[in-house]
Image (cartoon, grey):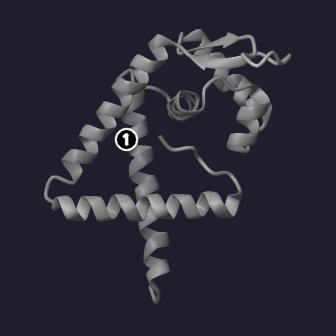
Amino acid sequence: MDKPTDLIEYETMLLSRHHMATRRARRTSGALEQSAYVLLSRLRIEGPMSIRELSEAFDLDPSTLNRQTSAMLRDGLAERIPDPAGGIARKFRITAEGERRLDEERGRIVRGVDKIMAGWTPEEVTAFAGYLQRFNTDIERLAGRPWPRP
């Protein structure tokens, strides 16, 4: 590995590997599916969104989003509502159950990150959070798809 970016590539590959391993374990624990976790997070921040708006936001085919939103509807995590602005398209809105499950999942993830970073100083945690946010916002800038942040 000749350059720091070589190491970043390798370490992000390992990070995705760790993420995939925990995803398998989460499936058996009743945790939210990853797609529901991300979609509900976006609906919480952005408010109700149509399939077209979700498709543009995630750069996903509407058929993929139809499958994912159908599962969320079935599980009571989201509901379809008329467009609050009076448009024709129906929109998806997070339900109280979706809010509860999202908060539960986020808490579980934060507790895991706290456990991983238990030996880090507060300054190291803050610096890492800042660099990770910058890394993500630069990816979003290049992709032309900024993610709204609270």
Residue lying at 71% horizontally and 29% vertically, measured from the top left: 65
Residue furthest bottom as drawn: 2
Q: Residue at x 33, y 38 (%)?
A: 109
Question: In front: 136, or 60?
Answer: 136
Give the residue pinned by disc 1.
22
Badge 1 amino acid: Thr
Q: In the image, 112: left or right of 138?
A: left
Q: Quadrant of residue 72?
A: top right
Classify mark 1: helix, strand or loop. Answer: helix
The image shows residue 8 at horizontal and vertical percentages of: 45, 72
Residue 47, quarter of the rendered image: top right
Tell me if mark 1 has few (under 14), some (14-19) or many (20+) residues whose alpha carbon lies within 10 angstroms of its own.
few
Q: Quadrant of the N terminus?
A: bottom left
Image x and y of residue 121, in percent: 15, 61
Q: Is residue 125 above or below residue 70?
A: below
Q: Quadrant of residue 97?
A: top left
Q: Is residue 28 visible?
A: no
Residue 110 coordinates in the image, percent (x, y): 29, 40
Task: Give the residue at x 69% y 23%.
Answer: 67
